[in-house]
Image: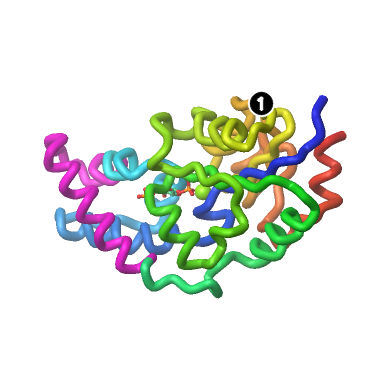
């Protein structure tokens, strides 16, 4: 068995809460189409791609559209969403995330991003975190969505690490499944109720320590 030397982080829900901006933008689109979209509905969009999110939204509203119309709406939502993320500040980084990343870097771990978002680079730049990542795999680089392990396997590959030496930090159930399908360790960020398949579940990165990471080797 390998020793963990690489940490792969999901973005939304682990490093930053962009879900609130996705929600505002999806809700505006739903309202324009004539139906409501609740925060409870928004839970279904976490961790899934933009087009899958739109398909879920349209299903909730009972709306059927052509692929061409869907492309236009997804683009419209993204333009609205980007007005929010372009205003993000480093103080929006979730508690403990930056210090944990810095601690890992100082200890010589390799760090990768494994996110479904096509806006990941914009967000990391706004948060001034880009320099902490040795590899960035985002929605522009993958063809398969989580729970497919592609996004995490590409991260390991780019860093020349074996999947068994990687640990993934994920807040979405599909992301936990993707990590396990890739043969990696997984730390769930959130509730054990949803993320019970992970090797360890913590509330947030503020609860993560080097010792807890090492314990995953056992
Ligand atoms: P975009 P993650 C995901 O980010 C979000 O959780 C999900 O809600 C969103 O639909 C997806 O990114 C795509 O985002 O529209 O920016 O390409 O959790 O994988 O970091
Ligand atoms: Mg996430």
Residue pointed to by mark 1? 183
Residue 185 sits inside the magenta stretch: no
Residue in the image at 60% along x and 25% along y: 181
Highlighted range, magenta: 56-85
Q: Image check: 33 left or right of 91?
A: left
In depth, the one of 177 and 2 nearer the eye is: 2
In depth, the one of 175 and 30 nearer the eye is: 175
Residue in the image at 58% along x and 59% along y: 131
Q: Regarding mark 1 in the picture, which secondary structure is present there?
A: loop
Determine which quarter of the picture holds residue 25: bottom left
Rendered position, 88 above or below 105: below
Principal secondary structure, stretch drawn in magenta = helix
Position of the N terminus, as image quadrant, is top right
Image spot of residue 49 (x, y percent): 38, 41
Rendered position, 4 above or below 113: above
Determine which quarter of the picture holds residue 102: bottom right
Image spot of residue 9 (x, y percent): 60, 48
Residue in the image at 68% along x and 57% along y: 101
Position of the C terminus, as image quadrant, is top right
Rendered position, 12 above or below 196: below
Image spot of residue 93 (x, y percent): 56, 67
Residue in the image at 82% along x and 53% along y: 210
């Amino acid at each position: 068995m390998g020793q963990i030397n690489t940490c792969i982080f999901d973005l939304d829900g682990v490093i930053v809460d962009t879900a609130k901006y996705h929600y505002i933008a999806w809700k505006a689109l739903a309202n324009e189409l004539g139906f409501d979209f609740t925060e409870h509905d928004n839970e279904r969009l976490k961790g899934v791609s933009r087009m899958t999110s739109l398909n879920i939204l349209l299903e909730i509203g009972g709306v059927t559209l052509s692929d061409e119309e869907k492309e236009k709406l997804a683009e419209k939502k993204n333009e609205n969403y980007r007005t929010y993320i372009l205003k993000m500040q480093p103080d929006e980084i979730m508690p403990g995330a930056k210090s944990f990343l810095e601690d890992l870097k100082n200890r010589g771990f390799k760090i990768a991003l494994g996110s479904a978002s096509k806006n990941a680079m914009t967000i990391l730049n706004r948060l001034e975190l880009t320099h902490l990542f040795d590899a960035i795999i985002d929605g522009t680089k993958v063809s398969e969505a989580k729970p497919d392990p592609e996004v995490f396997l590409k991260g390991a590959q780019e860093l020349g690490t074996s999947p068994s030496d990687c640990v993934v930090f994920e807040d979405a159930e599909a992301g936990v499944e993707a990590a396990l399908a890739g043969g990696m360790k997984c730390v769930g960020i959130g509730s054990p109720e949803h993320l019970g398949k992970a090797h360890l579940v913590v509330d947030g990165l503020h609860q993560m320590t080097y010792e807890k990471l090492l314990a995953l080797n056992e």
